[in-house]
Image (cartoon, rainbow, N blue to C red):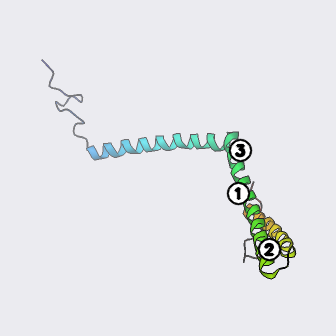
């Protein structure tokens, strides 16, 4: 026949007389710490040690800066073209709009890169991010 003593020798099955909530909390806390340690090691490998992550970040930054520049030029040319149509000053409105859009595009790139202060903020520009 089977022995009536449980795993802890008290004759009861399960965890015995220990408080079940405390055991459960301790076990969950231990598992949480293990998961945090595992995630921390994976994050440092992915962000610091891999060239692929740096390349993807670089491509994203390049796409952002180029779109900022192109948007400034397109808006300037569009406004110059509209002024030419309304005032009949072709091609001078387009030329002036192109030049102003080019300047605005460069200013947008500098602001996005953090090398120029944002609109309405005076003082020294912040140090460039590396």
Q: Residues within 10 Å of mark 1 (few under 14, many from 20)?
A: some
Residues under numbered marks 2 and 3 in contact, where contact means CB atoms less than 8 Å apart: no
For mark 1, give the secondary structure.
Answer: helix
Examine the image and state in which quarter residue 63 appears.
Answer: bottom right
Q: Position of residue 19 (x, y in %)?
A: 26, 44
- In this rendered view, identify the residue nearer to me: 12 or 55: 55
The residue at the point 68 percent across, 40 percent down is 52
Q: Position of residue 39 (x, y in %)?
A: 53, 42
Residues under numbered marks 1 and 3 in contact, where contact means CB atoms less than 8 Å apart: no
Examine the image and state in which quarter residue 14 appears.
Answer: top left
Mark closer to the chain start, 1 or 3: 3
Examine the image and state in which quarter residue 92 appears.
Answer: bottom right
Location of mark 3 (residue): 55
Cα–Cα span, label 2 and label 1? 25 Å
- In this rendered view, identify the residue nearer to me: 61 or 115: 61
Q: Position of residue 74 (x, y in %)?
A: 76, 66
The residue at the point 75 percent across, 70 percent down is 78
The residue at the point 37 percent across, 41 percent down is 27
Location of mark 2 (residue): 80
Location of mark 1 (residue): 64
Cα–Cα span, label 2 and label 3? 37 Å
> Which is in the foreground here, disc 2 or disc 3?
2
Q: Is residue 34 left or right of residue 69?
A: left
Mark closer to the chain start, 2 or 1: 1
Residue 48 seen in render: yes
Q: Position of residue 47 (x, y in %)?
A: 64, 44
């Amino acid at each position: 026949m089977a022995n009536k003593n449980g795993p802890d020798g008290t004759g009861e099955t399960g965890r015995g007389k220990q408080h079940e909530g405390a055991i459960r909390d301790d076990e969950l806390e231990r598992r949480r710490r293990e998961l945090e340690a595992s995630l921390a090691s994976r994050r440092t490998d992915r962000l610091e040690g891999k060239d692929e992550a740096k390349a993807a970040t670089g491509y994203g930054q390049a796409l952002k800066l180029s779109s900022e520049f192109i948007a400034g030029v397109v808006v300037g040319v569009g406004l110059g073209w509209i002024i030419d149509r309304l005032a009949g000053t072709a091609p001078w409105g387009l030329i002036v709009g192109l030049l102003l859009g080019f300047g605005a595009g460069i200013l947008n790139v500098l602001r996005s890169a953090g090398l120029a202060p944002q609109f309405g903020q005076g003082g020294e520009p912040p140090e460039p991010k590396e």
